[in-house]
Amino acid sequence: MYELQYCIADTQLILRSDFAISSDSSWDLFAHRANQFCFFYECRMHENIPDISGKRYFDTIRQRDYALTVESENQMQLHLSKENLPWGSNISQLYPQLALPHVLLMRNKLLLHASYIITDQGAIVFTAPSGTGKSTQAELWRQHRNAFVVNGDRAVVAVKDAQAYAYGFPLSGSSSDCHNRTEKLLAIVSLQQAPRNEVRKLPIGEAVGILANGSYLPEAYRTDMPALIDA
């Protein structure tokens, strides 16, 4: 039996498998061993995907299922087709099946499509659709305000003990910035392109919509969002 352990946004994850799954440099930043866990993954390799109820992942080229996940409280079984090897032998390849945005949201933590920087006063997270200028904004703060860019593509945000925090994440899209840093959150900034600069505080209804649209939560798990809003 093989085992990997990570801690992402104060969420301890353990993955055990009946075959070797390698980590990589960005995930290694979040490696953390603990006696207790928040969520447990059990990964199994099969000649054929078992005929049981769960979320199926379909291979449009081979015209068959290549993965199946079965979730219960605080744990998930991952069933993979041996035919797809070496796919599945690296943790990053399994990211869609891990459903991390869903797992985090069930613990009142939201994964955003965002650039995350740390300034002298605290963290700022810039969220916007692709191509709007998140990475450009982060780079300007690095050049002119000596900010530290934690992640150029993803950030986890959460409230703990009445204080908002930003967390790093082990994936960063095309950005080369990927670090494991946690910092008190000053602001989430929704970027838009316009002919002139303007900053305004968003009303709660508009802010919730922007957070929902900027999240990495798959459509199948969108019903999780009210739990975070209530929290």
Image (cartoon, grey):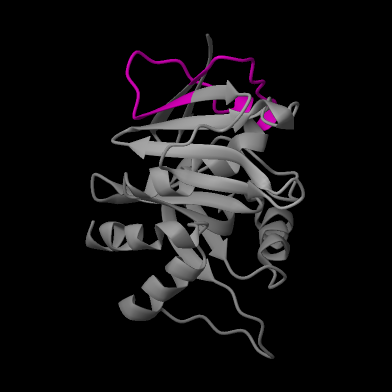
Q: Is residue 36 left or right of residue 42?
A: left
Comparing 187 with 106, the one in front is 106
How far across and down, in percent of the image, does residue 140 sit?
71, 62
Name the image quarter holding the C terminus: bottom left
Q: Is residue 165 visible?
A: no
Q: Is residue 103 left or right of residue 58?
A: left
Q: Main secondary structure of the magenta part?
A: loop
Magenta residue span:
16-42
Picture layout, residue 192 above or below residue 102: below
Picture layout, residue 145 above or below residue 85: below
Quadrant in the rendering for residue 19? top right
Q: Residue furthest bottom?
A: 195
Magenta stretch encompasses residue 35:
yes
Q: Which residue sits at x=50%, y=32%? A: 50
Comparing 90 with 56, the one in front is 56
Q: Is residue 204 visible?
A: yes
How far across and down, in percent of the image, does residue 82 sit?
67, 26
Q: Which residue sits at x=59%, y=69%? A: 128
Magenta stretch encompasses residue 173:
no
